[in-house]
Amino acid sequence: QLELSEEPVHIKARRLEMGDRSAEVVALRNKLFHLGDYIGNDLQSDLFDEDLAVAVSHFQIRHGLEADGILGQKTIRELNTPLLHRIRQLEINIERARALSKVHQERYLLVNVPAYQLYLYENNRVAYTARVIVGKKKHKTPQLTSELTKVILNPYWNVPRSIARNEIFPELKKDPQYLAKNNMKLFGRLNNQIYQVNPDAIDWSSLDAANTTFRIRQEPGAGNSLGQIKFIFPNRHSVYLHDTPARNLFDQPRRAFSHGCIRLEDPFALAEVLLSSGDGAYSKGDLEYLAKKSRSKVVELEQPVPIHITYITAWADEHGVVHFRPDIYKRDSQFAATLYNAKN
């Protein structure tokens, strides 16, 4: 156990990897020993050996970093986080966990945004887990509780006004064929009636994007931004779970890339788990076969599944190992201001 006055030494190296020799290796070895990641007995060796690389990888896994066993700047930054900060991070998340402890459903989905992870719980055990992509800092994924009620194969994407205004209309000014190239259609409204508009008839160079009433819809297909499947749970934020054609982004350890919705690594696997029982059961193969057709199809769940989108930046796993994640939306600091003011 460490007292606050026994703050482990800061690591000053810029980069260390297996085979390096340095006095900083000794400091690194001792710091990882105090943190519980290094379990060896030789604390004085200045050689960055395989045992130390394993310890660095273990630390990286606990902090949501790429587990390459190399001491780089991101790992050094996490290593040098003050102990008091970590203690407060644990206190903040213990308070958050109190709310989750009141969840008593037999089956529910939980998305932890800072962990970029989705979990399906059945009878208090994790039955399924998957990596996810969440919202960017300027398009934060909200915290909410709802019920997942349906799955849509080959969905349309009704482009949000903010995305159309800030991203698509500027592209159209540069390339009037942008909609056609991306399998999108343009719509207008007149006397409460929706009608399709020929984009070739619009002078995009003079369009006032901030005030236009045009709406854009992307048709189903391989290039659809929602992929081949999405999962609906009613909420005021208009967010949902969905597939994505940008599969390479799941290789990143930190995955805040979306406009607020949650992208799934293997959405058909989740759909199979949710739809594999009852009279209207579907296998993953059934769903993939249906998705190959161009038509959109709605599949209702026989029993809605509760979903909780949470924000937990520190937790202990089933082995009691503590994990930390960066406060990507600065919600820890906001929560801390309320928590510590209430205690004073």
Image (tube, grey):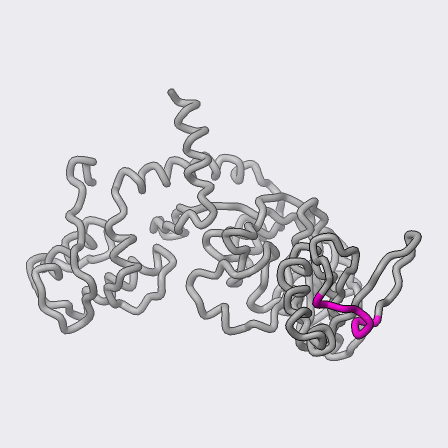
Q: Which picture quadrant has residue 135?
A: bottom right
As drawn, 321 above or below 5: below
From the viewer's perspective, is 37 left or right of 111? left
Specify the quadrant of the image occupied by residue 84: top left
Query: Residue 28: image x %, image y %?
Result: 16, 57
Rendered residue at 32%/60% (across/down): 60
Is 90 part of what is drawn in magenta?
no
- Residue drawn at (48%, 38%), measured in percent from left and top? 96
Residue 106 is left or right of residue 3, and the answer is: right
Quadrant location of the C terminus? top left
Give the residue drawn at x 42%, y 63%. Answer: 253
Q: Is residue 288 visible?
A: no
Task: Relative to 300, say whether 106 is above or below.
Answer: above
Q: Which residues are magenta?
A: 198-205
Secondary structure mostly seen in the magenta stretch: helix
Seen at 49% across and 35% down, the residue is: 98
